[in-house]
Image (cartoon, rainbow, N blue to C red):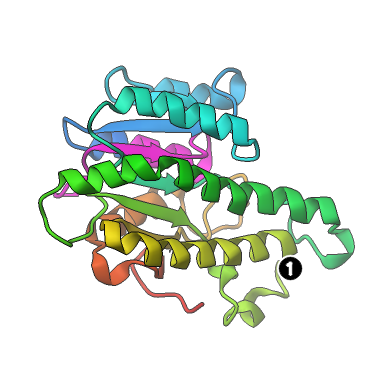
């Protein structure tokens, strides 16, 4: 990666899978003055050990964040704000998400609480986090002197979405994995992406949704064809290429547009 993302970068769901790999590759590729805030629900205990092993003083800060808890979101934002000083937030990667019940999650196995839990973490959590972080995103955008040019190195929100959020493409994959809560929550996240893109363009804050591919993670399963390493390398390359014309879009990890 010849170009580098810079400034302050915040990644949610950073203790495993795609989030952990995002932190790992970002730590290897960001510029000298960049800093990563790696967020997860529990920063103590075995599930965060791999993330702790990556933690580098001066480059990575671990932040406790539970997206299903508004108080936790507020505390995390306050902690991050104190550390960022005057720089603002250049890039927010909303990666954290849950899937309930386990795939293929047919209608017969899905209840109200599954729908509510998934929506709370996958949609309401990112909504509240962006709302609270907006002053920091605005600060980063205002510090840049590039006029109305948007980029992930200036001020941006990247929402990790999925191909199966596409309403148009639903018939192609529904028979494999019904996943009512996950599909509908990610479709809602796409609309949140569009709404934020419209509202924030006056601040020169870029907002885009990205599908990481079907990735071999705890959520994706062993049959997934794509490794976290390849998925993240592709997504970071896409992030470096994003500009005004991509705000409010849903792209895949190779930069291809996915229909709503």
Up/down of 83 relative to 31, above or below: above
Left or right: where does residue 252 sit relative to residue 29? Answer: right
Task: Depth check: give the residue in front, 134 or 25.
Answer: 134
Other-residue count near label 1 (Cα within 10 Å), few / some / many at <14 / 14–19 / ≥20: some
Task: Depth check: give the residue in front, 31 or 246.
Answer: 246
Left or right: where does residue 67 sit relative to residue 245? Answer: right
Task: Depth check: give the residue in front, 127 or 229.
Answer: 127
Q: In the rendering, at what x and y percent does residue 24 appear?
A: 36, 35
Q: In the rendering, at what x and y percent does residue 95 appear?
A: 49, 47
| Residue closest to the far right | 108
Up/down of 40 relative to 244, above or below: above
Q: In the rendering, at what x and y percent does residue 30 appear?
A: 22, 38
Up/down of 179 relative to 16, above or below: below
Q: Quadrant of residue 194?
A: bottom left
Stretch of the chain drawn in magenta: 1-25
Question: Residue at label 1?
Answer: 178
Q: Residue at x 65, y 65 (%)?
A: 183
């Amino acid at each position: 990666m010849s170009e580098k993302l810079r400034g302050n970068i915040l990644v949610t769901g950073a203790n495993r899978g795609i989030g952990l790999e995002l932190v790992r590759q970002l730590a290897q590729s960001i510029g000298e003055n960049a800093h990563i805030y790696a967020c997860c629900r529990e920063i103590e205990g075995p599930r965060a050990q791999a993330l702790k092993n990556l933690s580098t003083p001066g480059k990575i800060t671990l932040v406790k964040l539970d997206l299903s808890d508004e108080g936790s979101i507020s505390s995390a934002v306050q902690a991050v704000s104190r550390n960022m000083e005057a720089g603002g937030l250049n890039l927010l990667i909303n990666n954290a998400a849950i899937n309930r019940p386990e795939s293929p999650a047919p209608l017969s196995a899905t209840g109200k609480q599954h729908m509510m839990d998934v929506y709370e973490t996958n949609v309401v959590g990112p909504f509240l986090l962006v709302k609270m972080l907006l002053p920091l995103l605005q600060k980063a955008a205002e510090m840049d002197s590039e006029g109305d040019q948007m980029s992930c190195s200036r001020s941006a929100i990247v929402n990790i979405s999925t191909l199966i959020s596409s309403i148009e493409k639903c018939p192609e994959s529904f028979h494999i994995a019904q996943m009512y809560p996950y599909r509908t929550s990610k479709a809602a996240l796409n609309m949140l992406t569009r709404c934020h893109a419209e509202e924030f363009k006056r601040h020169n804050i870029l907002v885009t949704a990205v599908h990481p591919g079907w990735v071999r993670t705890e959520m994706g399963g062993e049959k997934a064809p794509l490794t976290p390493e390849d998925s993240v390398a592709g997504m970071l390359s896409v992030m470096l290429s994003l500009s005004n014309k991509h705000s409010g879009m849903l792209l895949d990890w190779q930069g291809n547009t996915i229909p709503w």
